[in-house]
Image: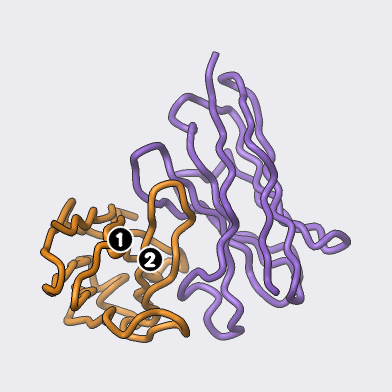
Chain colours: A orange, B purple
Amino acid sequence: QSALTQPASVSGSPGQSITISCTGTSSDVGGYNYVSWYQQHPGKAPKLMIYEVSNRPSGVSNRFSGSKSGNTASLTISGLQAEDEADYYCSSYTSSSHVVFGGGTKLTVL
Amino acid sequence: EVQLVQSGAEVKKPGATVKISCKVSGYTFTDYYMHWVQQAPGKGLEWMGLVDPEDGETIYAEKFQGRVTITADTSTDTAYMELSSLRSEDTAVYYCATVLVPAAQMNWFDPWGQGTLVTVSS
């Protein structure tokens, strides 16, 4: 099972919006609405930000939103803040009843 | 309060075996799968596999099949991940994680343990 494809890095200025893509196949991202997104700060455990493509857990800012089109899912962060600087990972359920993660994207807030 | 508390850091020699624990509290251990995720230094997250604590059934990722054993001890509400034939590439932080929604056992991970660093070095 190959990792989902994410851009290695994205950047944006405070107040701007950025989007991180996560591309898979019809056997994972495209086949199920079970895409989730995680934020990870250095030395910390990942934190769930979006589940089942577009749902936000309680306590996660509404500046974070998710969507999916075909085999590509996306995480959008609006109104960028310095605290959003972190690594972001997508994951998906797969047709082989496994889970696959993306390679991760480093977000830099300029 | 739901907690997943992992055992401490380990240093192992190549070829050895490591066993990491993840003790849960605040929920019924047998109701939800426990997953394990590897993160090598400076690298991404990699799903290793899971155990269903209710019956001990496991699923392993192909990359780790044959070297990983994930178990659950329902008497102590603790999950274990054992990795054998260690090599330098296994140096990583290992996380346990679950999802406390019955119909979503493979769909996302929340909460996570704090992570356990395993260093493989001669």
Label 1: which secondary element: strand
Which amino acid does the dot numbered 2 rest on? Tyr
Q: Which mark is residue A38?
A: 2
Are the residues at dot 1 and dot 2 in contact (C-beta closer than 8 Å)? Answer: yes
**Tag 1 subunit:** A
Kindly tell me whether residue A9 is visible in this rendering: yes
Residue B38 x %, y %: 48, 47
Q: Is residue B16 left or right of residue B41?
A: right
Against A106, residue B16 (above or below) is above
Which amino acid does the dot numbered 1 rest on? Tyr
Residue B28 x %, y %: 76, 76
The image quarter in which residue A69 lies = bottom left
Residue B76 x %, y %: 85, 59
Q: Which mark is residue A88?
A: 1
Instruction: Say which of B37 and A71 sits in front.
Output: B37
Against A43, residue B85 (above or below) is above
**Tag 2 subunit:** A
Q: Is residue B83 left or right of residue A73?
A: right
For marks 1 and 2, the one nearer the N-term is 2
The image quarter in which residue B72 lies = bottom right
Q: Is residue B73 left or right of residue B118?
A: right
In the orientation shown, which residue stands out farthest toward the top?
A: B122
Q: Which mark is residue B74?
A: none
Determine the CA span between mark 1 and mark 2. 6 Å
Residue at (50% x, 53% y) in the render: B37
Point out the image quarter for the C terminus of chain A: bottom left
Residue at (42% x, 39% y) in the render: B40
Against B52, residue B115 (above or below) is above
Residue at (58% x, 28% y) in the render: B85
Residue at (66% x, 74% y) in the render: B32
